[in-house]
Amino acid sequence: MNKQQLFENIKRKQSFLCVGLDTDIKKIPEHLLKEEDSIFAFNKAIIDATAPYCIAYKPNLAFYESMGVKGWIAFEKTVEYIKTNYPDQFIIADAKRGDIGNTSAMYARTFFEKLNIDSVTVAPYMGEDSVTPFLTYEGKWVILLALTSNKGSHDFQLTTDTEGERLFEKVLRKSQEWANDENMMYVVGATQGRMFEDIRKIVPNHFLLVPGIGAQGGSLEEVCKYGMTKECGLIVNSSRAIIYADKTENFANVAGVEAHKVQQQMAEQLKAIL
């Protein structure tokens, strides 16, 4: 999916919502535990209920890898279900990979060849040769970690060099030598607020994947005020606030209601550019 197709989906659905599939076997409704594949059963129901209101899904690999082979199978089935039934959805493998070149090439092969996923999150700490193997696939996206919403982001990302440049700014500037806004996005946490202004000075046209709305307390209005572009430029993720909004047998319907609420808020924000 290219940048224009992504924007067309945003306009058509009046939404830039990404539903995070952070599926924890210990948090899903108990009645699903009798299913042969509880994780996939949960995901399938969530996807069917939320697909009208979102433009992307983001399975977080940690939640599947923690289940061993069964978890990986559920992940593959989830990806295939989305691709088959909702082919307009942008799929993000939230894997945060990044290693020496030949290892990154194997990670890229996993997600882009074996699974044919649209994008993967990548950690930039090891530099260019750990990122570029992901960039050799036409039509695929790298989503580079830039400024995250966790408390520890201050440990490294906001530190400055002798010229006053912060580390996340160096990541943004340097990485533009490797790719452009047609195949690279950046992760920026929703709780960063006005920091989006500083980010847009460096990457004015790139899409940003924004976690932290909902359970983490990020403000959608603030993100849009400082981060939205004329092509939206935002994919805003919500996980727990949607998928775990209810633990009864009505969980999927409630998730759909919550996703619809966010979509309506996003439609209001999109009026400024559409």
Image: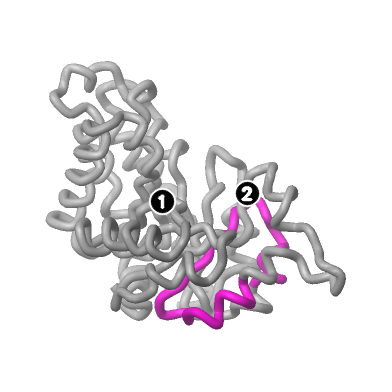
| Residue 124 x, y percent position in the rendering | 55, 62
Kindly identify the residue that appears in the image at 25 percent across and 23 percent down.
249
Q: Amino acid at mark 2?
A: Ser
- Of residue 22 and residue 274, the one placed in the foreground of this image is 22
The disc label shown at residue 63, or none: none
Q: Is residue 202 left or right of residue 183?
A: right
| Residue 75 x, y percent position in the rendering | 25, 42
Check disc 2 and report the residue beneath it. 149
Kindly identify the residue that appears in the image at 35 percent across and 80 percent down.
4
Q: Is residue 128 left or right of residue 105?
A: right
For the question of whether residue 215 can be seen, the reply is: yes
- Of residue 178 and residue 239, the one placed in the foreground of this image is 178
Q: How is the image coloured?
A: one colour
Q: Quadrant of the N terminus?
A: bottom left
SS for callout 2: loop
Q: Is residue 232 magenta?
A: no
Q: Earlier in the sequence, mark 2 or mark 1?
A: 1
SS for callout 1: strand
* CB atoms of marks 2 and 1 within 8 Å: no
Using the rendered view, name the quadrant where residue 120 is placed. bottom left
Check disc 1 and report the residue beneath it. 94
Kindly identify the residue that appears in the image at 48 percent across and 65 percent down.
130
Q: Amino acid at mark 1?
A: Asp
Which is closer to the viewer, label 2 or label 1?
1
Kindly identify the residue that appears in the image at 37 percent across and 21 percent down.
26
Give, as a single range, the part of the protein colored magenta: 172-199
Around disc 2, counting alpha carbons within 10 Å, would you say few (fewer than 14), some (14 to 19), or many (20 or more)?
some
For the question of whether residue 187 can be seen, the reply is: no
